[in-house]
Image: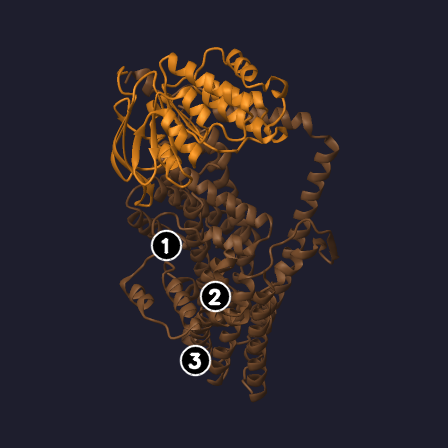
Amino acid sequence: MEDAGVLEVDDLVVGYSGTPVCGPITAQLDPGGILGVVGFNGAGKSTAARTIAGRQPRIDGTLRVHGLPADEDSIPFRRQVAAVFDEDAFFPSLTVREHLLLVASGHGIDQPETAVGEELEYFALDSRADVVPGALSSGQRRRLTLAAGLIRPSSLLILDEPEQRLDPVMRGLIAQRLRGYADDGGAVLLVTHDPAMLTSTADSCLLIDEQVRHLPPHEAAKDIAGQ
Amino acid sequence: MSTEAESPVAFDVRGFTASAARAYNRRNTKFSVLFIDLYNAALAAAIVLALSGSTVYAVREQLVEAAAARQQSPVDEQWAVIPPPVLLAACSAAGLLAVLTFARRLGPVSVGRVESQWWLPLPVARRPLVAAPFTKALVLLAIAASVAYLPLSVLTLLETTVTGHVAGAAVFGILAAAAGLLAAAVQVDTGRRRRTALAVVVLLPAVLLPLAAASGHLWPLVPAMTIAAGAWWHVSPRLSGIPAAELTRGGAVTGHARSAAFLMNTNELVQALGADSGAEPPSASRYTTRLFAARPRSTAGALLQADVVAFLRVPRWWLPPLLWLLPPIAMLLAELTIPTILQLGVLLLAAGGAASSAGTVARQTAAVPGLDKLLPMGKASVACVRMAMPAVTLMVWMVLLTAILALFGIADWRLVLLGAIAGAGLAGSTLRSAYKPVPDWSQPPVDTPFGPVPRTQLSALTSGTDVLVVSMVPLALAVYLGQVTTVLLAIQVAASAAAWIAAMVSLSRRR
């Protein structure tokens, strides 16, 4: 695995069925870096994140993760890239613990039960570990999907508005966790509307507006607050 | 990239999920509840089998009596009469092509929303995730196809033994599974048009195999199984290569269709099954673009123009109405003297199918209520304009159908005039069906001879069908009597006008 350039994006244009939604985007993300992505609703932040996660084809430009094309159908890509979007689908007969065990075991973690126990505690889900997700509150379900994204090994973490449905305490814990992930050598692409989360985590920031601009996180945070 | 990074994780995702779900269900399901569920399911199946079995038997008795009495087909042109085995082969071909088409729309290899979120991002081999449910679906398809084939065989091959019918049904079931596999072959490969054409070329001659099996031969099992095995041999190693986006698309369509069927929402079901499998986007041809650019003279003209353009941009809009012409024609030309009630039933079914296929745009506009309020027009006027395009289509459809009926001597040529008026009335059914109320499942059920039915579900189920029946009664009478009278023509005008009024009232009542 190459050390430099976890994510390399050059003149990337994203959209649906050949119609551009936003771009061109140029950015680079190295190990230990956190790149914030901000912008108004409908600017194309989530579309860009989904494209980088390999879930939809790009329209134009270059997109490489560890030097390889972004493709969710490639096993090496799936090993390296963890993505958490606003998806709220769960197996109706699997408990919270079993959902996390599924992800941990599916990624070949040696002692999945231990890893699951740690994540349940971190996300304050330990008291709800043996109920099915249908019995959880909306915020608890969101915590479960975030825990599933963080329990597995990865070198690039893509989060689409992780602050949604979370209380301020949990938002702070997520920010802390992201910083720790980056300190351990991971790279994070963080799409957010939360100025506090942006300034407490991101090293650099992309503002997706009528055009895409690179801004320091504190300036981008002011822009979000203005919106 | 190291070899370890490229190799999939050896973990049985499917097995883990199944065993965890099984354990949870065992913990949380009481034996008494399970017993009641099983009892109800068995009872429902037994009732359906008894009702359909006795109906088939009764119809068969009538056919046997008619054959013994040497009753002639009502068709004057005896050269055009379809012998029963040919009719059965045509029905089989239609069934297999329907399986091929709809299986492709539903995937056929797919994963649901939950699986796509939790399974597909894992670095495991995808083949075990999709192979088992696909195999299960194929087995169920084979059983369902065999069960559906059996009554057709019983009603058309009057001289065949029970063993022959069962053998024919078994061979047809295998062919249906093969059609599902060929749909998967289209899904896993590029060059879809070529693959689809190849699948059709393989399946069409195979419709003779169930007929051969029905006449007491066992050898048709061999070619039928060879087709299925060949398709499996081609598809199986390629299951891992189906892109996640395609698996998810199929799962979304399947989920949509399943929930629509569960809620008995026919509009949603038609929408789900009509979903494009990604092969062909709606076409904006130069012709329709020019048509849309023409300046309308009035508000109603603008709405009509938009409707016509939207209709002409529906991919292959002309195909379903043409296909719906075939069942009544086939039934009319059949050598068997089919009971009148069954003939009229097929005529109604075909008219309903044609009316529904002319309603694609109406269903789209019904789904977005704001569209009807864009222009400064009353709801009744909007309804009238919305019925214009379906009315033209259905009048042409009815003229074609009745012209063929008249050509073969069912009635005189005034039947065509009657048909054209009935076709205009069918547009009322199209619109009323598209704008039918959404079922309110929170309302208590009402008792019916078929058991308790949710209150608003009755109106949702009958909305559209009621107007269809009203529009078709005079025409059906003319077909039954074999003549068209002035009184019938007058009744038909009144019935079609009533259908339009009912549709206008339906649309006006919507918020």
Tell me which chain the residue with mark 1 is part of: B
Q: Position of residue A154 (x, y in %)?
A: 39, 19
Chain letter for the brown part: B
Which of the chains is orange?
A: A
Left/right placement of residue B390 relative to residue B154 reads left
**Residue in the foreground of this view, choosing between B210 and B97:** B97
* Dot 3 and dot 1 residues touching (CB under 8 Å): no
Q: Nearer the viewer, mark 1 or mark 2?
A: 2
Q: CA distance from mark 3 to mark 2?
A: 21 Å
**Color style of the picture:** by chain
Q: Residue at x 46, y 50 (%)?
A: B217
The residue that mark 3 highlights is: B407
Which chain does the residue under circle 3 lie in? B
Q: Earlier in the sequence, mark 1 or mark 2?
A: 1
Judged left or right of residue B88, residue A182 is left
Q: Residue at x 66, y 26 (%)?
A: B26
Label 3 element class: helix
